[in-house]
Image: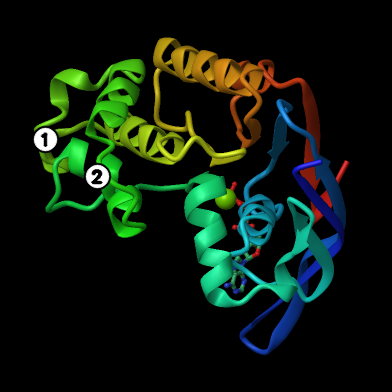
């Protein structure tokens, strides 16, 4: 078991009114699984992923990652774990404009002081079809190409869990299919994949799927 979340609730307060963005969500993830979550905008998907990645604290409930509960870890332990064991492809663009594609792919590696990984990064850029753009800056890339940079970056640490929030949202069908084949291949090598998507074609690649509605996983 890589990840086990139980009884997750998240209360948000906006303009003085509180509401439950997540209402009793439980989920477990095993090695090599490819889990898809589909659900309408605002149903709580990103909130759930942020909690599972240890970036957001739930109002109640627990998350165990590789047997350790997030609430028992210090900030330092949590970020160490995130940078080595978990890859998170966030919704929206997260590449840094003043670094090249290759440098962006290497950023978490450099920050964690893990030595030279340029060759591994180039091989991942090759896999996502971006090797020819390695020396370019983000301003000259399309939305889909930028998305593929964040995919390569998340895979560089060979995470045990890859979390992806709408990774194919701005990709054409063919490129989305290529990304799904990469996810399938990493999951077959043992990395668990947990993906949120609106795209039913992409969801079909999952080995297990859920629907999220009003803060509940169905
Ligand atoms: N920090 C916050 N404070 C208050 N409300 C929030 C906060 N973050 C998210 N919400 C609200 O919580 C609900 C769930 O948001 P979330 O981002 O998890 O949805 P989502 O399912 O990922 O939607 P989308 O498909 O549009 O990305 C939404 O109604 C959103 O407006
Ligand atoms: Mg979202």
The scheme the figure's colours follow is rainbow
Q: Residue at x 55, y 75 (%)?
A: 75
Query: Where does residue 112 sit, x and y in percent of width and height?
Result: 36, 57
Indicate whether 199 appears above or below 161.
above
Q: Quadrant of residue 13?
A: bottom right
Along the horizontal axis of the image, is 191 left or right of 21? left
Q: Which residue is mark 1?
A: 140
Quadrant holding the N terminus: top right
What is the x, y in percent for residue 21? 74, 64
Work out whether residue 119 or residue 169 is closer to the camera in this orientation and state it: 119
In what element is the residue under mark 1?
Answer: helix
Rendering coords of residue 137 (x, y %)? 11, 40
Which residue is found at the position 31% from the left and 56% from the top? 113
Name the residue nearer the viewer: 86 or 170. Answer: 86
Q: Residue at x 34, y 24 (%)?
A: 124
Furthest toward the front, the residue is 115
Task: Return the residue nearer the eye: 177 or 57.
Answer: 57
Front residue of 76/143: it is: 76
The CA distance from mark 1 to mark 2 is 14 Å
> How many residues crowd mark 2 within 10 Å: few (<14), some (14–19), many (20+)?
many
Q: Is residue 94 visible?
A: no
Q: Which mark is residue 104?
A: 2
Relative to 108, say whether 205 is above or below.
above
**Mark 2: secondary structure:** helix
Q: Point out the frontmost of discs 1 and 2.
A: 2
Quarter in which the C terminus is drawn? top right
Task: Please say if the residues under marks 1 and 2 sit with CB atoms less than 8 Å apart.
Answer: no
Q: Is residue 154 left or right of residue 10?
A: left
Disc nearer the start of the sequence (1/2) = 2
Tell me which corner region of the image, top left, top right, bottom left or bottom right, holds residue 148: top left
């Amino acid at each position: 078991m890589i990840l086990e979340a139980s009884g997750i609730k998240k209360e948000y307060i906006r303009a003085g009114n509180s509401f439950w963005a997540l209402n009793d969500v439980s989920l477990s993830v095993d090695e090599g699984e490819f889990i898809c979550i589909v659900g309408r905008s605002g149903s709580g998907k990103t909130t759930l992923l942020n909690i599972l990645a240890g970036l957001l604290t739930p109002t109640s409930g627990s998350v165990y990652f590789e047997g350790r509960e997030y609430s028992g870890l210090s900030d330092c332990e949590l970020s160490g774990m995130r940078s080595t064991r978990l890859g998170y492809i966030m919704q929206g663009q997260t590449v840094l404009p003043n670094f090249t594609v290759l440098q962006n792919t290497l950023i978490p590696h450099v920050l964690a002081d893990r030595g030279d990984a340029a060759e591994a990064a180039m091989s991942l850029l090759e896999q996502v079809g971006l090797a020819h753009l390695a020396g370019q800056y983000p301003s000259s890339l399309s939305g889909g190409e930028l998305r593929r940079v964040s995919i390569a970056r998340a895979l560089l640490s060979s995470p045990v869990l890859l979390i992806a929030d709408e990774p194919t949202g701005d990709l054409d069908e063919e490129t989305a299919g290529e990304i799904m084949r990469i996810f399938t291949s990493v999951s077959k090598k043992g990395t668990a994949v947990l993906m949120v998507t609106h795209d039913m074609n992409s969801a079909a690649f999952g080995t297990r799927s859920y629907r999220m509605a009003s803060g509940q996983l169905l």
